[in-house]
Structures are given as C-alpha cells and as structure tokens.
Amino acid sequence: MNLNSVRMGIVAIAFGIAGNGMVATGAHADEFSFTATNTTNSTITEVLVSENKSDWGYFEIGSGIKPGSTVDLVWDQSTNSESCAQWVKATYADGSESEPAKFDFCEDGLEIDF
C-alpha cells in the first residue's frame, strides 16, 4: 500500500499522509472518522498508523495536537478498500512515543486517547 496518495482531514483542514502501511475499509459509511485526544503534557507531533506494525504512515498534523486538545480526524475515501484493523501510535514534542495500540477504525464514534 502506498500512503503518498492518501489524504485525511482534521476538522475542516486537510492534511497529507506520507509513508506506507496506513489503511481504512470499504464497508463503511460515506465519511469515516474518529477523534484523537491528547491526554499527556506534551504536544503530539505525529499520529502514525500501520496495518502490520512494520510499515508506518503518518499524518501531517501541522503544529500538532496540544495537551488536552481533541481533534476530529476524517479518512479520505481513497482508503475505503483497506482493512479496518490498524495499529496507531503517537510521537511527542519531548521525543517520546506511545506504545502501538490496535483499533477498529470501522467502529462508529471511535475515540482514541493518547
């Protein structure tokens, strides 16, 4: 899979995705989204996604997700033929990285806390 052609929106702003390994599914509604909340004291600088925990794609999230902030992330329709089950992790401004956790992105109302 090539993520270079995939796009995702954060709220109403579209950000590009780069790398390999990110996916979503074909059996979902017109708009496939989830929320991401930063529960730490450090800004999230990257949200990384992988189907296999080996090839990671990342979301360009601009200046990041500030501590205590929640953002809505919307998958582009070009990912609709991919798997729902994905590994997700975050990198932080302080240089740390969260442990990968597996989520079902087809789940309605999915909320991810980092």
Image (cartoon, rainbow, N blue to C red):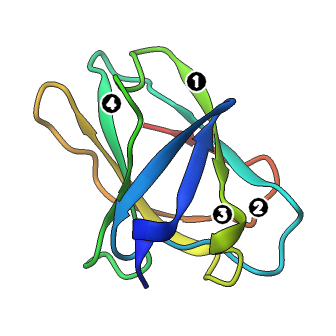
Indicate left or right for 54 with 15 as reference.
left
**Tag 4 or tag 1, which sits nearer the N-term?**
4
Distance (Cα) linking label 2 and label 4 = 23 Å
* Marks 3,2: beta carbons within 8 A: yes
* Marks 2,4: beta carbons within 8 A: no
Can you identify the residue that label 4 sits on? 44
**Tag 2 or tag 1, which sits nearer the N-term?**
1
Would you place residue 82 above or below residue 13 in this image?
A: below
Secondary structure of residue under mark 4: strand
Can you identify the residue that label 1 sits on? 70
Q: Identity of the amino acid at label 3?
A: Phe
Few, some or many residues within 10 Å of mark 1 (<14, 14–19, 20+): some
How many marks the image carries: the answer is 4
Secondary structure of residue under mark 2: loop
Few, some or many residues within 10 Å of mark 3 (<14, 14–19, 20+): many
Which residue appears at 44% of the width and 26% of the height?
38
Few, some or many residues within 10 Å of mark 4 (<14, 14–19, 20+): many
Distance (Cα) linking label 3 and label 2 = 5 Å
